Amino acid sequence: MLKPINLFLIFAIVASRLLPHPPNFTPVIAIFMLAGSINLLGCLIAYLITDAVFGFHSYMIWVYSSLFMIAYLQRGPVLSSIIFFVITNFGVWTSGWYGYDLHGFLMCYLMAIPFFINTLTSTFIFSIMIKSLIDENTKNFIYNLFNKQSSVS
């Protein structure tokens, strides 16, 4: 059975991808960073559902492999953001959009820096927020909020 915190984080993945937001400014990496201790399968399914809504794309293997590695390593917002940046932009470079030479390789990563700044910033912000939700006291509060039985006087 999924706990309320798991349902909330799965909902956050779906909502953050469907609602308008600045490019790469979502809680997705922060959630996957903590997914190993939460519910990796649920997070992957939620991400897959949103890809089904948006349409599947040729970079999915790169995105999913980076998210899986982030969930597996659980090394914090900086390394998680770097992993996502390196893996997904390597996938972009292999598409040939920037050319298959050193100049194209460097240009691919250079053009992605503004997106990386958003990724890093959002991962820091959302990891702090999510970590506070997972805190034992907060977890008990959320659990009691959803499972409160009405008392009859």
Image (tube, helix red, strand yellow):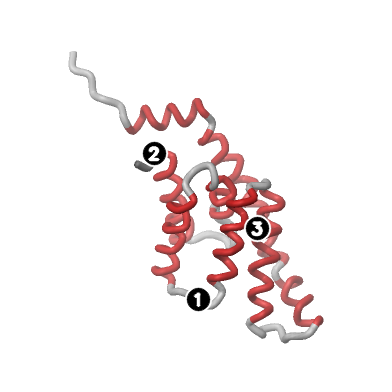
| Residue matched to label 2 | 4
Asked which quadrant contains residue 111, the reply is bottom right
The residue lying furthest to the front in this view is: 72
* x and y, in percent, of residue 104 in the image: 76, 82
* x and y, in percent, of residue 80 in the image: 66, 53
Give the residue type at disc 2.
Pro
Eye-nearest disc, 1 or 3 = 1
Asked which quadrant contains residue 119, the reply is bottom right
Residues 107 and 35: in front is: 35
Give the residue type at disc 1.
His
Query: Which tag, 1 or 2, sits closer to the chain's start?
Result: 2
| Residue matched to label 3 | 118
Residues 16 and 50: in front is: 50
Query: Which tag, 1 or 3, sits closer to the chain's start?
Result: 1
Give the residue type at disc 3.
Asn
| Residue matched to label 1 | 57
* x and y, in percent, of residue 58 in the image: 53, 78
* x and y, in percent, of residue 120 in the image: 67, 54
Q: Secondary structure at mark 3?
A: helix
Query: Which tag, 3 or 2, sits closer to the chain's start?
Result: 2
Q: Residue at x 70, y 65 (%)?
A: 86
Q: Is residue 29 above or below residue 128?
A: below
Q: CA distance from mark 3 to mark 2?
A: 28 Å
The residue lying furthest to the left in this view is: 152
Q: CA distance from mark 1 to mark 3?
A: 22 Å
Q: Secondary structure at mark 1?
A: loop
**Residue contact between numbered discs 3 and 2, judged by CB atoms under 8 Å:** no
Eye-nearest disc, 3 or 2 = 2
Q: For the residue carrying disc 3, how many other residues have a C-alpha within 10 Å: few (<14), some (14-19), or many (20+)? A: some
Q: Residue at x 43, y 52 (%)?
A: 42
Q: For the residue carrying disc 1, how many other residues have a C-alpha within 10 Å: few (<14), some (14-19), or many (20+)? A: few
